[in-house]
Image: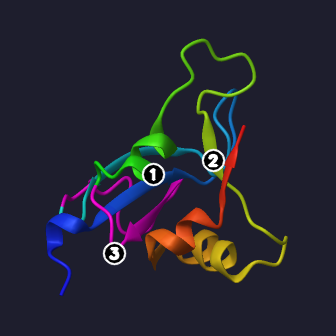
Amino acid sequence: MIDVVDKCKLVVRRFSSGLDFMGDCVNSYPIDFYLGELVEPQGGAFVIIEVVDASPKHPVILALIENELEPTTANKKQFLQPVLSSDEFFYELLTVGRITVTLAKLQEYIRAH
């Protein structure tokens, strides 16, 4: 059984603005951390990805939230992008505002800016 400390939630941008793009991961938190009414439960400008088998300090999660030191085209080094425009993962994420995945599934969508 996976302990709660091995789970995390990612706050992900729903929309692009300036050097911040849809799919950029803003930050990661322990799974039981409440993010407030502006983010949870509906999402708004952000959506939530719950990762069931990685802590907020997992190397893949840390790389996903890492900022560019001198951004010219994007603030983040990596972002999440659908494999296909009709991708079920992104459809559910953007319509519901929250999705639960494994780290392996999340890694299918990580791209470099």
Other-residue count near label 2 (Cα within 10 Å), few / some / many at <14 / 14–19 / ≥20:
many
Q: Main secondary structure of the magenta part?
A: loop
Residue 97 showing in the rendered view: no
Q: Is residue 44 left or right of residue 83?
A: left
- Magenta includes 8? no
Across and down, in percent, residue 57 comes to 28, 48
Which residue was labeled with disc 1? Answer: 60
Who's the residue at 76% across and 78% down the image?
A: 87
For the C terminus, the quadrant is: top right
**Corner quadrant of residue 9:** bottom left
Q: Which mark is residue 97?
A: none
Across and down, in percent, residue 31 comes to 24, 65
- Magenta includes 48? yes
Residue span colored magenta: 33-55
Which residue occupies the foreground of this view, 61 or 29?
A: 61
Other-residue count near label 1 (Cα within 10 Å), few / some / many at <14 / 14–19 / ≥20:
some
Who's the residue at 67% across and 72% down the image?
A: 90
Of the numbered discs 3 and 2, the one sitting upstream in the chain is 3
Across and down, in percent, residue 77 comes to 61, 34
Residue 71 showing in the rendered view: yes
What's under tag 1, amino acid-wise? Val
- Cα separation, mark 3 vs mark 1, equals 13 Å
Of the numbered discs 1 and 2, the one sitting upstream in the chain is 1
What's under tag 2, amino acid-wise? Phe
Who's the residue at 19% across and 58% down the image?
A: 33
**Corner quadrant of residue 112:** top right
Which residue occupies the foreground of this view, 7 or 99?
A: 7
Which residue was labeled with disc 3? Answer: 52
Which residue was labeled with disc 2? Answer: 79
